[in-house]
Image (cartoon, rainbow, N blue to C red):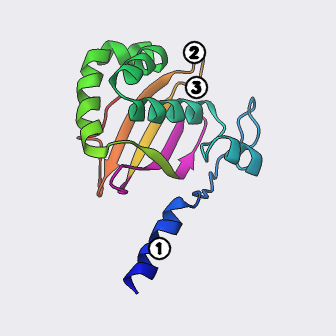
Amino acid sequence: MKRVLLCAVLLSLSLPVVVHAGAESHPSHPSAGSAAAASDRDGWPDTRVGELARGWVTAFSSGDSAMKVYLAAHMATASLADKNVPQRIERYRDLREKYGRLELASVVKSTDEKLTVKLMGSDATRTEFIFTAQTEAPWKLVSVAIREAGHFGHGGFGH
């Protein structure tokens, strides 16, 4: 019986995650809810903030140097003035140790400016991340916050 249960769990972990983005389409992007857009983007909404969040998660899971490059290129100038890349990398290291690699588990809410997702860490725990982006050119990432176990903000990533 234990083997059957273990096989069922392993099989369910290998299946692709299906998410409902619930996003309105962006004028310059196809509908975020379309099956083609979702499958091409591994479930990420086809919005500017969706693209920024996807890039952030990829950099997060790739290591320090990838994260440094990502932050320098994609964080809003005002956000970097408030907390520079070396400060952000220190916080990143703490979070990387806590979560390991991250991957999209589900999309909670998506708008043109803000994306709330559940990301799964290496230990299979799911944590809510909130990505906020500029709504005008140059359309960069303003912040990344983490909502953990019933509280928000204090202890978040603060990007």
Circle number at residue 138: 2
Residue shown at the point (63%, 56%) measured from the top left = 20
Secondary structure mostly seen in the magenta stretch = strand
Frontmost residue, 139 versus 118: 118
Circle number at residue 7: 1
Q: Write down the residue under mark 3.
A: 135
Q: Is residue 124 magenta?
A: yes
> Which residues are the magenta region?
106-126
Extreme residue toward the bottom, this view: 1
Q: Earlier in the sequence, mark 2 or mark 1?
A: 1
Q: Quadrant of the N terminus?
A: bottom left
Q: Are marks 1 and 3 in contact (CB under 8 Å)?
A: no
Instruction: Give the x, y percent position of residue 48.
Output: 61, 30
Q: Is residue 136 magenta?
A: no
Q: Earlier in the sequence, mark 1 or mark 3?
A: 1
Residue 143 vs 65, above or below: the answer is below
Sort mark 2 into few (<14), some (14-19) or many (20+) by Cα contacts within 10 Å.
Answer: few
Frontmost residue, 120 versus 158: 120
